[in-house]
Image (cartoon, rainbow, N blue to C red):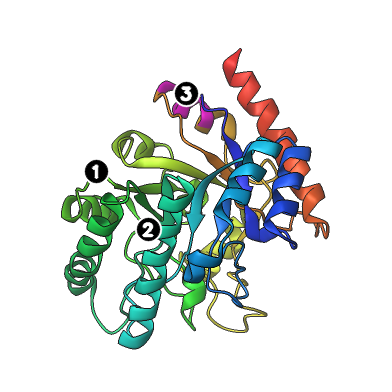
């Protein structure tokens, strides 16, 4: 089993150095670093739009000083955005992040395929190839592997509908058949399959060659509410965009996913990639206002589960 355990950096405030220091203090040894454009609410820990002004040497020294490796640079946005101007901006920034990854010797860049909501899945798959073939060629020349995540991104839709084309085993199979490049893979998040009532263990075997990284967050389901709202969740009287009605993201270990079984399967498959906490500030029963405390609880839980698997 891999010993690379980290978290997505934008759950914390502060500089990249402060986040690396916190990661080391909490027992993490890798980090997935947010690289949205400067000024974005999603955070910009390293400015990929202005690589010439990035102190690359300092970042490498900080990684060494705190013994925390940056495994992935991420810009999770819609690369098939219906607005062609916005799509172009997203793709250009992704290319900048790929160049930054090369400069920092970071192997992975994470993003979404996304979806053009004005077209059906078939047309989107055609657009995906047109958009991603050049992206993957660009990344291959720089020794970078592009990873997508299997999230439906319902929060991109006013009504909470799926807004990507890579969130079920059926769709992922089509995606990887159309884009078979060696430097294209999957950042696998089992929670998104679980709330869709899809087996989250079977895809580990099916996509074992594509899965390069794992996102870890838990989820709790309310079966009674699911019977009322259905798989796509609540449509009416939503309190906020994350009010799905029947499921709630939560800290790892506080939800319904059987992580011992999940990590046992990863061990059987000789998985060696990074495991990154996608931090959520709920423990299933109430809010944890201090993300550092939540990250510590998550690390303690993963340590117990993964050590149990190694015995």
Q: CA distance from mark 2 to mark 1?
A: 20 Å
Q: Which residues are magenta?
A: 263-268
Q: Which residue is mark 1?
A: 182
Q: Position of residue 134 (x, y in %)?
A: 22, 63
Q: Position of residue 10 (x, y in %)?
A: 64, 60
Under tag 3, what secondary structure? Answer: helix
Q: CA distance from mark 2 to mark 3?
A: 24 Å
Numbered disc in front, either 2 or 3: 3
Q: Tell me if label 2 and label 3 are in contact, CB under 8 Å.
A: no
Q: Which residue is mark 2?
A: 167
Q: Tell me if label 2 and label 1 are in contact, CB under 8 Å.
A: no
Q: Nearer the viewer, residue 297 or 61?
A: 61
- Give neighbour class at mark 2: few <14, some 14-19, many 20+ (Cα, 10 Å): many
Q: Position of residue 132 (x, y in %)?
A: 25, 63
Q: Is residue 73 left or right of residue 31?
A: left
Q: Nearer the viewer, residue 25 or 83?
A: 25
Asked whether the viewer can see residue 217, the reply is no
Query: In which quadrant of the rendered view does residue 148 lie?
Result: bottom left
Seen in the picture, residue 291 relative to 22 is either above or below; the reply is below
Inspect the magenta stretch and tell me whether residue 107 lies in it.
Answer: no
Numbered disc in front, either 3 or 1: 1
Under tag 2, what secondary structure? Answer: loop
Q: CA distance from mark 3 to mark 1?
A: 22 Å
Q: Main secondary structure of the magenta part?
A: helix
């Amino acid at each position: 089993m891999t010993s690379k355990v980290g978290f997505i950096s934008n759950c914390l405030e502060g500089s990249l150095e402060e986040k690396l220091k916190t990661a080391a203090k909490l027992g993490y040894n890798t980090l997935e670093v947010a690289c949205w454009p400067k000024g974005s609410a999603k955070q910009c820990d390293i400015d990929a739009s202005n690589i010439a002004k990035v102190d690359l040497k300092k970042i490498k020294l900080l990684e060494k000083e705190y013994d925390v490796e940056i495994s992935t640079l991420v810009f999770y946005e819609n690369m098939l955005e219906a607005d062609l101007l916005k799509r172009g901006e997203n793709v250009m920034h992704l290319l900048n992040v790929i160049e930054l990854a090369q400069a920092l010797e970071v192997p992975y860049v994470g993003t979404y395929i996304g979806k053009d909501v004005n077209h059906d899945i078939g047309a989107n798959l055609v657009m995906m190839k047109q958009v991603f073939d050049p992206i993957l060629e660009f990344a291959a020349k720089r020794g970078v592997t592009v990873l997508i995540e299997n999230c439906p991104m319902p929060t991109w839709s006013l009504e909470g509908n799926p807004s990507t084309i890579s969130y079920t085993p059926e769709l992922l199979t089509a995606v990887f058949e159309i884009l078979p490049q060696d430097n294209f893979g999957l950042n696998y998040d089992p929670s998104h399959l679980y709330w869709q009532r899809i087996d989250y263990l079977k895809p580990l075997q099916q996509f074992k060659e594509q899965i390069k990284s794992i996102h870890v967050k838990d989820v709790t389901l309310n079966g009674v509410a699911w019977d009322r709202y259905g798989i796509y969740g609540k449509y009416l009287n939503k309190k906020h965009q994350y009010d799905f009605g029947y499921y709630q993201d939560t800290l790892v270990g506080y939800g319904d996913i059987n992580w011992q079984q999940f990590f046992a399967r990863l061990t059987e498959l000789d998985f060696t990639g990074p495991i990154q906490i996608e931090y959520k500030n709920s423990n299933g029963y109430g809010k944890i206002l201090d993300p550092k405390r939540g990250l510590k609880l998550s690390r303690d839980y993963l340590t117990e589960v993964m050590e149990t698997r190694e015995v």
